[in-house]
Image (cartoon, grey):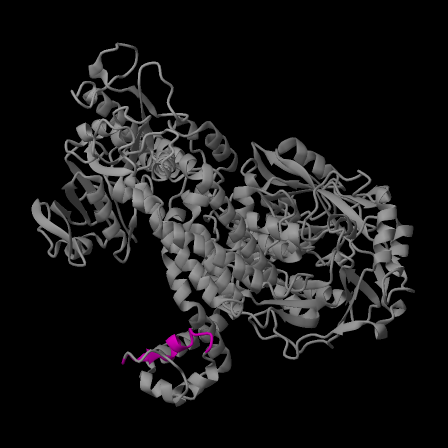
Amino acid sequence: MKHFDVIVVGAGHAGVEAAAAAARVGVQVALVTMRQSNIGMMSCNPAIGGLGKGHLVREIDALDGLMAQAADRGGIQFRLLNRSKGPAVQGPRAQQDRRLFQSAMQELVAGVDGLTVVEGEVVALRIDAGRVIGIGLADGTEVGAHAVVLCTGTFLGGVLHVGDVRAPGGRVDEAPAVRIASQLREVATGVGRLKTGTPPRLDGRTIAWDRLEMQPGDEEPVMFSFLPGDPLPRQLSCGITHTSECTHDIIRANLHRSAMYGGHIEGVGPRYCPSIEDKVVRFSDKASHQIFLEPEGLEDPTVYPNGISTSLPADAQEELVRSIPGLERAVITQPGYAIEYDYLDPRGLSLALELRQLPGLFLAGQINGTTGYEEAGAQGLVAGLNAARSALGQPPVTFSRAQSYIGVMIDDLTSHGVTEPYRMFTSRSEYRLSLRADNADQRLTPIGIAAGCVGQGRTVAFGDKSEALEQGRAVLQGVTFSPHVLAQAGIRVREDGERRSAYRLLSDPAVDWATVAALDPRLSELPATIRDQLAKDALYASLIERQRTDAAALQRDEAVVIPVAFDYRMISGLSTELTVKLERIRPETLAQAGRIEGMTPAALTLILAWVRKGQRMRAAS
Amino acid sequence: MDTIFAQASARGKAGVAVVRLSGPGSWEAVRVLAGRLPEPRVASLCTLSEAGGRLDEALVLTFAEGASFTGEEAAELHLHGAVATVAAVLRALSGLPGLRPAEPGEFTRRALENGRLDLAQVEGLADLIEAETEAQRKQALRVLSGEVGRMVGRWRGDLIRAAALCEATIDFVDEDVPVDVWPEVRGLLSGVLADLERERAGVGAAERIRDGFVVAIVGRPNVGKSTLLNALAGREAAITSEVAGTTRDVIEVQMDLGGLPVTLLDTAGLRESGDAVERIGVERAKERAEAADLRIFLVEAGEEPGMEPREGDLVVRGKADLGDAGGGLAVSGRTGEGLEVLVGVVSERLAGRAAAVGVVTRERHRVALGLAAEALRAALQNGASSVEMTAEFIRAALRSLDQLLGKVGVEDILDDLFASFCIGK
């Protein structure tokens, strides 16, 4: 029987990052997919990044993952969202040419040492003595592994809905994973259903572009990867249109035929990605809803009308599309559909994304209740990294909320579970000012190097950049000016005789780089990328300093590890309600325990006391 | 690491109150208040003062890091037991940089973290923590009931709404959300800020700490209210005479009742009066009596009180010296009969309430209101030009008000956001 250190099941955005991360750590990896040609496919909208999501892409890149590089090569319209706002809330986003992205991703995967692609359908997990030891394929082949990472996306028990027509499927024209879904329902608890949807795809040649508002990309594109990339492909614009009252009438008239409203779907859909049916029902006073017409590629005429995801029957979809300005003669190339799939309650996962009930099994992506390529990719990386480390007998690497959006996401999932597909927003992070897209490498690359998932090339590039930043910071903090000199330069500060460093001056949003640089020639010598980064650090320095006490307290609590088998029932004084929650969530650290709903400072102290007591008793024996 | 402080001794009749400090700023705090730093572990008599004003004559103990109950640098201030004194010292401490009132159980927590508790003590923690939780629960109930509760509920709603508006313009920039949310955000923040400042400066918690509890004596004219007050106060504070309606205004006497500071109110007798001045007096008496913490209804045998007594109020038969035996508590201001029993009952009831609303808890609230107000001012100052900073300050305000509002999580904010705007392209 063939044996790998790590087997990754599914080659979507979570799967490729998981396989590549595990291979970077230095183990033998099999990436199993039903169709090799579908590796890296974008099943939903043709775009990568955005707010919170762009941050995740940068974090994946900082850990030497693949998504950022593929998205830079596939990008046909780059926009830095919130460009007019502060750097902490700016997120890079790019429309993608599906084929370019996918071929870039396949090339990157092919270039990973130690990664073997296996084509086949996984029908079973092989389990021995409560531990996952490999997989079984549909053709009867068995493959052994130390750890398995499941990245099943929407395939796990997937059912497609168009109106009242339903059919099993993981994507259009692709079969779902049924047998492994039923096995999971047997061996794991907490299986639930979620739902997501897509809009109909249009033939762009039948759209009246000349009558639509067009949205071009940024003149100076902001790329995803910290590494230098290839020249960009040709850039395109997106079109903007909107629904009309007539569209809404059509939807209302057909509402009973919608899969969502006809009662055919039990899964819960996301509030921030509602179907057009939902929008019309919930916001009935709104006369029109915005639609972005996103081209799917340079050579591909397909257009993705972002904003009208629907599960109405095909004939109603056609009627509704044609009621939209500019789409009067548009031809639907593929109807929109809703898809329902299985997920596992992520509260059953460790922070390393291993299923506590079934050691050796790691989960990433939609199976954990999330939505989005970026969320999936980030989890894939963490799961793959830890699967490989467990194969090597190394302790898991986990990510803190104070350090990364990856940490925020995994902590949210494992502490609170999900009630709808989970998507990243910048508002989910309490350390938003320090967790910026621009400093993801400074935050995470050192962790990645220590964890063994960052290759030589990036390690060297990062070292050079860090050194330049250190030197630049020394210059900015070392060059100081008296209030008198500043007044002459038009910078107003208090006349207190105190000299202020260039770094401190930059913390005032009203003071720009050019004004400061004019004060001393040493400043204008700094390379543009370095000074931009430093200016962003400086801008938030005082607020971040204020948060430092919070972050320090958090890190202290994160350092208190609660043993896996900790018996909460022996603690007298803990309420039954809290005991039950703690047993279900099994927080790994005191910090995680503190975020459980209903937790009190007093109860935390009790838990800490008993953890300490256990440590001392072990030390004594 | 912050330096924390709290009253460590139990409240009540004790002559001495102990305030503990722990953390790196403890000694510096002693140096500031006492003007010098006594040698560690040597009890020293010091005059504590703040900005030149004398706070108390206290016994001060300091402990070096590694040799204290928490393992941190620490100090103890042994103060005179009066509530007002303790409150003034706590207030002075919270004004020092780096110092804040301790969270419930925080001393224990620090002691634990530094390995200063033995296993037997750990076993005993459960009781302590249950007691703290119960005190917190009572505190929360008290804060969240009535007028204050409604106001706190409004703050919560307004701050969540303001945060949601800011977040909408940050996280959903490509969506159909209003671009200029600032006028609404400014309105919401200014409103809450004004409330916070009024609460902090006003008659709320702060004044209670200074004045203690208010006990009103109410009853028909000439039932002996003023005589009772004078007897309790031990001096002629209110004029007593045989003419009904002598007390036309409200007379206040501050006194120590079982170790608690109490303001006794002698009120105009409740009766219909043709005299305009007296009518005003009666109205005022009713108002003050309504607002008091406890009412002593003085009645004659078989008579009903003139107002509806609330839970915890006392109905007492007056002029007990004039004979007329009957059930229940009877007192006479003139002979002193029953006075001791009355004082015992009143102070017991007040002490029960004092335990539920510890001075420390109130000091924590005052500090929280102050921090929240500061954060809201910063948010208003940042305004629309740097919305991510504004959002940060709103969050900081919400965190400071956690104890009052309950925790506001990002889900609360997202709920408001998704309910208000059609998000999702």
Which is nearer the eye, A182 or A92? A92
* Residue B14 image point, x, y percent: 17, 32
Report x, y in % for residue B418.
Answer: 64, 51
Q: At 20% across and 22% down in the image, what residue appears?
A: B339
Give the residue drawn at x 43%, y 35%: B141
In the image, taking residue B147 as reference, residue B222 lies left or right, namely left
Residue B395, percent across and down?
A: 47, 55
Check the image and name the residue furthest to the front.
B274
Residue A39 visible at all: yes
Extreme-top residue of the structure? B325
Q: Between B80 and A458, which is closer to the camera in this rendering?
A: B80
Using the image as rendered, state which of residue A32 and residue A51 is in the foreground. Answer: A51
The answer to if B45 sits in the magenta stretch is no
Q: Quadrant of the C terminus of chain A?
A: top left
Picture coordinates of residue B149, whole percent (x, y): 46, 41
Residue B111 seen: no
In the image, residue B40 sits, relative to residue A533, either above or below, namely above
User: Which range of residues does the magenta coloring cover?
Assistant: A497-510
Q: Residue at x 7, y 47 (%)?
A: B44
